[in-house]
Image: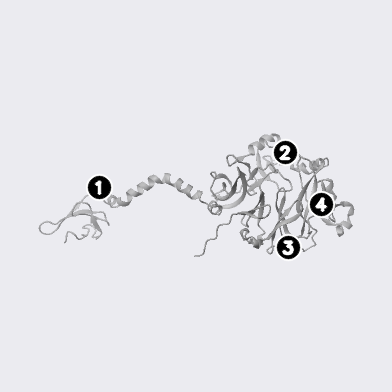
């Protein structure tokens, strides 16, 4: 046997043996046996060695074991830096993919910088977890650590909502279970439930179990449910609370003394013959108003003056302008003064006011009963009631095409409107003239 050949293991017979350090000393990679071969006079002599248990196997793995130990030692320090590196370069569309389902977004301004506020939802076991992420709108660089909110997944019936009140502040509601306001200085949402209980201690001091931000018909208001089950309308900026069961009677009495008027835009439904699709006209209405008091834009019937229903019961209806009448309670009890139908006075289908600012109204409709075809988005100038910008959904591919754009939404922000695609993700920021200020869509990758 040549001293340079690889010997067979005298224990298991394997040929996988390697040098074990000293000359003619070997270790079996199969069973771990250590032995030496003496090439003196005569036949080679094999001597078995008795190593410390496991030492041979440990020595055989020493080449990669030491680097592994070094990596494990530096990993706790390295991971946060790697995460921060990737986070700092994340664009909004990449962040959406990493954080979960988009539940809302808006834009706030601080010191001339536009900030994108995004709300994401994830399910973690039996918890619904929301994360508020605030980043620079253009670069996508996070400006604060994500703020985490957690609640039992079946604890609320509502959804997440970001809403600006008329004070310009951004408010947050989650599953109708909480109420927060964004602090611009710290970029954190501050819990307002303790303040809610303190302000209205006689009604809510025992606890609050539900908070829902109300729609455009009751601006700057909340529907609050106490721990006793009683419901109230809370006008947060006016520091007023009204029992929900008494709100209609109290408002009827109060509005009779109001001396000013306020305007409101809404699509009002026309009478619908049996079997036909709903149609609506864009209407500007005026209501009694008093500064410092709640406002309620109630819904009302819109009946043409030549309709059969009006001829059948004329004494129960009141003319309100534009060739239309409505039931008298809207005028007497709700404070409706008059209306004006916005030209061209064409009935629309699946129509909706998406958002309204001080100078513009963002609206959408379908020109025919087929809701998946030809959906239109327009900007209306409130000073002239003229359309200043108009596009169809197929002209705005960033908004998606699901159900023909029926799920596209919008929100008024400082200096324009934020449009959301059909997955409720921010898609376009446009100015009051309709021009695109920022496109949130992911860049198109070049074909390879």
Asked if disc 2 and disc 3 are in contact, CB closer than 8 Å, the reply is: no
**Could you say whether the residue bearing mark 1 is in a helix, strand or loop?**
loop
Asked if disc 4 and disc 3 are in contact, CB closer than 8 Å, the reply is: no
Mark in the foreground, 2 or 1: 2
Q: Is residue 206 at all visible to an observer of this figure?
A: no
Mark positioned earlier in the residue sequence (3 or 1): 1
| Residue, disc 1 | 52
Asked if disc 4 and disc 2 are in contact, CB closer than 8 Å, the reply is: no
State which quarter of the image contains the N terminus. bottom left
Alpha carbon distance from label 4 to label 2? 27 Å
Mark positioned earlier in the residue sequence (2 or 1): 1
Alpha carbon distance from label 2 to label 1? 82 Å
Percent of width and height locating residue 9: 22, 58
Residue 128 falls left or right of residue 259: left
Please give the count of numbered marks on the rendered protein: 4
Residue 205, image quadrant: top right
Residue drawn at (89%, 54%) of the image: 314
Q: Is residue 327 at all visible to an observer of this figure?
A: yes
| Residue, disc 3 | 367
| Residue, disc 4 | 339
Residue drawn at (70%, 60%) of the image: 376
| Residue, disc 2 | 238
Circle 3 residues within 10 Å: few <14, some 14–19, many ≥20: some
Percent of width and height locating residue 87: 50, 49
Alpha carbon distance from label 4 to label 3? 23 Å
């Amino acid at each position: 046997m040549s001293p340079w050949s690889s010997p067979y293991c005298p224990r298991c017979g394997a040929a996988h043996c390697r040098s074990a350090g000293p000359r003619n000393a070997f270790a079996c990679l199969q069973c771990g046996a250590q032995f030496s071969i003496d090439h003196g006079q005569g036949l080679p002599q094999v001597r078995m060695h008795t190593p410390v248990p496991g030492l041979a196997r440990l020595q055989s793995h020493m080449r990669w074991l030491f680097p592994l130990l070094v990596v494990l030692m530096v990993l706790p320090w390295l991971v946060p830096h790697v995460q921060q590196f990737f986070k700092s370069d994340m664009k909004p569309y990449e962040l959406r993919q990493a954080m979960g389902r988009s539940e809302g977004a808006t834009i706030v301004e601080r010191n001339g910088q536009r900030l994108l506020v995004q709300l994401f939802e994830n399910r973690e076991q039996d918890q619904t977890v929301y994360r508020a992420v605030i980043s620079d709108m253009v670069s996508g660089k996070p400006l604060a650590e994500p703020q985490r909110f957690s609640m039992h997944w079946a604890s609320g019936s509502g959804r997440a909502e970001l809403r600006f009140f008329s004070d310009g502040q951004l408010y947050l509601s989650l599953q109708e279970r909480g109420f927060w306001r964004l602090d611009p200085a710290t970029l954190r949402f501050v819990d307002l439930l303790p303040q809610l209980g303190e302000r209205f201690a006689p009604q809510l001091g025992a606890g609050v179990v539900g908070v829902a931000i109300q729609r455009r018909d009751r601006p700057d208001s909340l529907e609050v449910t106490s721990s006793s089950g009683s419901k109230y309308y809370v006008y947060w900026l006016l520091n007023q609370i009204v029992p929900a069961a008494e709100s209609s009677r109290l408002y009827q009495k109060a509005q009779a003394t109001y001396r000013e008027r306020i305007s409101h835009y809404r699509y009002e439904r026309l009478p619908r013959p049996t079997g036909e699709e709903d149609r609506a006209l864009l209407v500007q209405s005026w209501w009694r108003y008093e500064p410092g008091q709640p406002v309620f834009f109630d819904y009302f019937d819109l009946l043409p003056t030549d309709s059969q229903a009006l001829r059948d019961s004329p004494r129960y209806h009141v003319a309100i302008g534009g060739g239309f009448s409505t039931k008298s309670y809207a005028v007497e009890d709700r404070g409706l003064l008059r209306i004006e139908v916005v030209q061209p006075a064409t009935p629309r289908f699946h129509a909706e006011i998406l958002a309204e600012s001080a100078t513009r109204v963002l609206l959408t409709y379908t020109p025919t009963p087929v809701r998946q075809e030809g959906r239109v988005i327009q900007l209306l100038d409130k000073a002239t009631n003229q359309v200043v910008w108009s596009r169809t959904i197929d002209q705005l591919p960033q908004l998606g095409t699901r159900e023909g754009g029926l799920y596209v939404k919008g929100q008024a922000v400082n200096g324009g409107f934020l449009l959301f695609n059909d997955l409720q993700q921010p898609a376009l920021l446009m100015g009051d003239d309709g021009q695109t200020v920022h496109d949130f869509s992911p860049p198109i990758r070049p074909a390879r």
